[in-house]
Image (cartoon, rainbow, N blue to C red):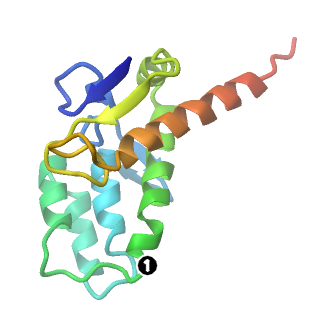
């Protein structure tokens, strides 16, 4: 069975980067993975001044809109680093929040797909033939967390 997710209020909404599960990463607290991800687009660029505005955005939708503004210059290496930045943030989210970590682990070996009708890079796109990088990231994080948990040793 394939598990599709998209909106925060839908089943498996905690898999969305817009879910209200903050992360501490690189010494800073971010309200959502979306806030963090959008801000990382501008690290070291001439438009890095937007980062505090993205960080302070009231909602992940607002953070996304600020990060997607086409008049701003992204960091030069963005296409090379964006998937690893996403993976780091998603892993941090599911390590930090036990409740959603359990939701992720209970998906077993099911295929996870971001059912975004507008994003064929992170999601499956309108025709469901997209690259689904967010779903692939979640499945990779699920496996890494399983491996970390299997290494946990209790001492008496």
Which of the 4 quarters of the picture holds residue 40? bottom left
Q: Residue furthest bottom?
A: 46
Where, by quadrant of the figure, is residue 149 drawn? top right
Q: Nearer the viewer, residue 25 or 150?
A: 150
Q: Position of residue 82 (x, y in %)?
A: 41, 63
Q: State whether residue 80 is above or below residue 30.
A: below
Position of residue 52 measured from the top left corner of the image (x, y, whole percent) = 26, 67
Left or right: residue 116 compared with residue 111:
left
In the rendered image, residue 151, in percent from the top left (x then y), is placed at 77, 27
**Which residue, as the protein is rendered here, is positioned at the far right?**
156
Please name the residue that numbered disc 1 is placed on: 77
Q: How many marks?
A: 1
Q: Residue at x 42, y 28 (%)?
A: 111
Rendered residue at 39%/39% (across/down): 135
Asked whether 74 or 130 is in front, the reply is 130
Find residue 131 and report its horizontal and vertical position in percent: 35, 50
- Density class for disc 1 (Cα within 10 Å; few <14, some 14-19, many ≥20) is few
Left or right, 47 with respect to 27, comes to left
Residue that lies at the very extreme toward the top in this rendered image? 156
Quadrant (top left/top right/bottom left/bottom right) for the N terminus: top left
Label 1 secondary element: loop
49 in relation to 89, above or below: below
Residue placed most toward the observer, 38 or 114? 114
State which quarter of the image contains the C terminus: top right
Q: Which quarter of the figure has residue 150?
A: top right
Q: Is residue 90 above or below residue 98?
A: below
Note whether 87 is above or below 112 in the view shown: below
């Amino acid at each position: 069975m394939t598990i599709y997710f998209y909106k925060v209020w839908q089943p498996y909404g905690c898999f969305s980067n817009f879910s209200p599960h903050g992360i501490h990463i690189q010494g800073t607290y971010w309200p959502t993975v979306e806030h963090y991800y959008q801000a990382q687009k501008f690290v070291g660029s001439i438009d890095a001044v937007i980062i505090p505005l993205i960080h302070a955005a009231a909602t992940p939708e607002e953070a996304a809109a600020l990060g997607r503004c086409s008049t701003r210059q992204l960091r030069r290496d963005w296409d090379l680093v964006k998937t690893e930045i996403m993976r780091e943030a998603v892993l941090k989210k599911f390590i930090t929040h036990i409740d959603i970590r359990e939701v992720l682990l209970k998906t077993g070996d099911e295929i996870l797909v971001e059912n975004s009708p507008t994003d064929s890079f992170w999601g499956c796109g309108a025709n469901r033939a997209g690259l689904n990088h967010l779903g692939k990231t979640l499945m990779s994080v699920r496996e890494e967390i399983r491996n970390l948990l299997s290494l946990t040793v209790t001492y008496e």
